[in-house]
Image (cartoon, helix red, strand yellow):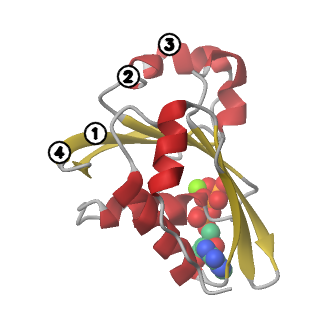
Amino acid sequence: MPHFKAHLNDEAGTAALGAALARALTPGLAIYLHGDLGAGKTALTRALLHAAGHAGHVKSPTYTLAEPYTVVIAGRPTDVIHFDLYRMASPEEFLDAGFREYFNRHNVCIVEWPEKADPVLPAPDINIFLAVSGQGRDVECQALSDQGSQCLDRLHFAPNL
Ligand SMILES: Nc1ncnc2c1ncn2[C@@H]1O[C@H](COP(=O)(O)OP(=O)(O)OP(=O)(O)O)[C@@H](O)[C@H]1O
Ligand SMILES: [Mg+2]
């Protein structure tokens, strides 16, 4: 399975990765973002959504837990659902809110703090790990399915190392 690591020197590096992901995504992908508070999960998602054509604000869905955006993915209008599960009290809340239904072959789901819904969350196609490193961030992307592999194979990402 494809796998890569990179260093993102600054927020522009994170934005470049978000834009590269926006170009490589296909409907149906589930991407889980791992990393501590302030690691850059929302910054990456924001860059991805803007690169995919969303013109407005992207703020963390801290209280609503999920925020849908309609953008262009692989040339067609696609719903990208941005989750931030940090404040979820229990995994049952995820099921009660009907969030599982968002995970289908039409949508792209991007999940911050997937650990909070661990036993009930569908398996991801791609895991992205972000960590503070010096002034910048280390990132690691890992494909876990065929569709996730194809996405990372298409991802032409060359950060300034
Ligand atoms: N490559 C980078 N180098 C330095 N700073 C960065 C980089 N990428 C993002 N940042 C900054 O790091 C911060 C990341 O905040 P962000 O809200 O994205 O974190 P988060 O992982 O979503 O945290 P939370 O778990 O609280 O939701 C922002 O201030 C952003 O400007
Ligand atoms: Mg966040």
Residue under label 4, please give it. Answer: 76
Q: Is 94 situated above or below 25? A: above
Secondary-structure class at tag 3 = helix
* Residue in the picture at 48% in, 67% down: 156
Residue under label 1, please give it. Answer: 79
Q: Amino acid at mark 2?
A: Asn
Q: Amino acid at mark 1?
A: Asp
- Can residue 116 be seen by looking at this rendering? yes
Residue under label 3, please give it. Answer: 96
Which mark is first along the chain, 2 or 1? 1
* Residue in the picture at 23% in, 66% down: 55
Front label number (1 vs 3): 1
Q: Find the distance from the CA under tag 4 to the CA under tag 3.
A: 30 Å
Front label number (2 vs 3): 2
Report whether the residue tagged 3 is closer than 8 Å to ligand 1. no
- The percent position of residue 6, horizontal first and vertical second, equals 69, 70
Which mark is first along the chain, 3 or 1? 1
Q: Is 61 situated above or below 53? A: above
Q: Amino acid at mark 4?
A: Arg
* Residue in the picture at 43% in, 65% down: 20
Quadrant for ligand 1 reads bottom right
Q: Are marks 2 and 3 in contact (CB under 8 Å)?
A: no
Q: Amino acid at mark 3?
A: Asp
- The percent position of residue 4, horizontal first and vertical second, equals 68, 59
Residue under label 2, please give it. Answer: 104
- The percent position of residue 144, horizontal first and vertical second, equals 63, 34
- Can residue 83 be seen by looking at this rendering? no
Secondary-structure class at tag 1 = strand
User: Could you say which is closer to the camera, residue 5 or residue 83?
Assistant: 5
Q: Answer few, some or many: residues within 10 Å of disc 2's Cα (few below 14, many 20 plus, some between 14 and 19).
A: some
